[in-house]
Image: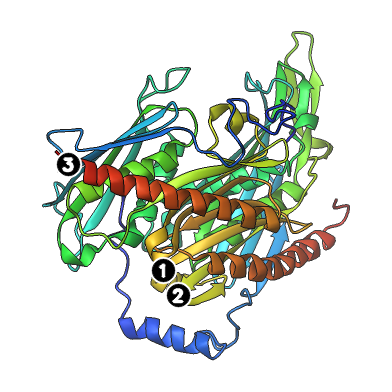
Amino acid sequence: MSVTPFRLPTIPLYKKETIMNLIAKGLRLDGVRTPESPRSVKVEVGVIEKAEGSAHVRLGNTQVIAGVKIDVGTPFRDTPDQGVLTVHAEFVPLASPLFEPGPPDENAIELARVIDRSLREVGAVDLNALAIRPGEKVWIVWVDLYILDHDGNLFDASMLAAMAALLDAKLPYYEEIETGEIVLDRSKSEGPLPVKHRVVTVTLAKIGDYLIVDPDFEEESVADARIVLAFDEQGRIVGAQKTGPGGLTTADLEKAMDLGWRAAEVYFKALDEALAGKTGGS
Amino acid sequence: MAKAQVQLISEEGLRHDGRRPDELRPIRMKVGVLSNADGSALVEFGKTRVIAAVYGPREPIQKYMVLPDRAVLRVRYHMAPFSTSERKSPAPSRREIELSKVIRESLEPVLLPEYFPRTTIDVFIEVLQADGGTRTASVTAASLALADAGIPMKALVGGVAVGKVNGVLVLDVDEVEDSAGEADLPIAAAPDIGLITLFQLNGVLTRDEIRAAVNMALKAIEYIVEKEKEALKAKYEF
């Protein structure tokens, strides 16, 4: 069951008016950004040594860690020759007064599923290259997103973290023993996880008649709706989701695709820089 | 991901069930199909069959679940265990939880919740038979059930999915096209106030394809919403 959020902080009307007046002048509440620019992005990979791949993303004050764990398992019946990619998100209670301990709520599930679809549909991870013994043993790739600090736009920060962690990930070394079992030695590696495409999402918030890129928490709280667009490096749209209680016009959608692609290039650059800083990276 | 190349568009440009790319399946709508609910509707898009019921505005059963200045909308999208080829467990799946959310958010833009502070409006949707496009049929059924319950609305909402099959954009995808297709773009909109209220993309499309798909969907939704108006009027004809 999905319920209208009834525990959100009350935002004074003047705050929304202030935000809208600033946008009309090409400004944002933080005094630095334009409506079209995302916050500063910092991506760092290899932050969790025990994970096969990991990344820490800061998007303004929002912080997300993604960890990639890789195991051996059985494939799905309808895709016996492919590995398995699973994305999960945890909105841990230390990240926001709005998050409660417990199983993932609809927001965490939505976030994980939008990211999962955007990676899956374009074939970001080459699942065909992840069969060890087709039909029997394949690599299972778990992407776990951990929201550490929620200051808005969890989608873009999480997708950046997921993508950076996948690009950072290495397949563990394995040996087939006599019984046919696969034994892993995680201290050694089989080589990088095969990643074919890079994907980022760009979230835009609609506030009154305006669209702004990368809303922070306050901006999200007064927004009518948000649109999340996933882009690959060629600018194709590989996933999308309208989220929030309001609606969008076709003109909004058109503008979102335009502004979205420009912000996507900023995110791709942040990914490149993070991976260039890593020796022996892909 | 490499999808199995199934030929779903014939040489004449027709689809596997004989439809043209921009043709809807046969649609049926009926309101007031349940006696207990304040409003209800049955909607069919081909073999997809969805029933929706509305209770409220009413005092919330969980007393804490209120807003002092407006009504709270609760939506549950649920699939019957017998609605799919393989039995679906009745426990809510992650998919159903996500769809309940996007359906709620597709209805909220047309409601006037400030008319009913401290109440809940409940929308319960059951998919009786799933053959593609269940979420958009659900939005359509929910919109009808809300109107049937006499809840003030700015406009009616209708939904339809556009897919891409063998490189061709097709309207109102069924299950075969959805599982073999390259993209699925479910859209719901309130044409009378010019708002898109549900927008998802599962697949890869260029910006031009998105533009074309949205136009195709919005044209169909105008027709679907006219059908909704007819169904609502039909209840009071004798």
Q: Which residue is mark 3?
A: B237
Q: Residue at x 54, y 52 (%)?
A: A146
- Name the side, left or right, on which B122 lies relative to A216: left
- Name the side, left or right, on which A112 lies relative to A73: left
Q: Could you classify mark 3 by the number of other residues whose Cα lies within 10 Å: few (under 14), some (14-19), or many (20 or more)? A: few
Residue A224: mark: 1
- Mark 1 belongs to which amino acid? Asp
Q: Residue at x 12, y 35 (%)?
A: B36
Do discs 2 and 1 belong to a common subunit? Answer: yes
Q: Is residue B78 above or below residue A74?
A: below
Instruction: Please say if the residues under marks 2 and 1 sit with CB atoms less than 8 Å apart.
Output: yes
- Mark 2 belongs to which amino acid? Ile
The residues bearing labels 3 and 2 have C-alpha atoms spaced at a distance of 43 Å
- Name the side, left or right, on which B209 lies relative to B175: right
Q: Secondary structure at mark 1?
A: loop
x then y, percent, for residue B44? 38, 32
Chain letter of disc 3 in the image: B
x then y, percent, for residue A225? 44, 65
x then y, percent, for residue B217? 53, 50
Q: Residue at x 58, y 25 (%)?
A: B17
Q: Could you classify mark 2 by the number of other residues whose Cα lies within 10 Å: few (under 14), some (14-19), or many (20 or more)? A: many
Specify whether residue B101 is in view. no
Q: Which residue is mark 2?
A: A207
Residue A24: mark: none
Q: Is residue B69 above or below residue B234?
A: below
Q: Residue at x 80, y 40 (%)?
A: A194
- Mark 3 belongs to which amino acid? Glu
Mark whose residue sits in front, 3 or 2:
3
Q: Residue furthest top?
A: A179
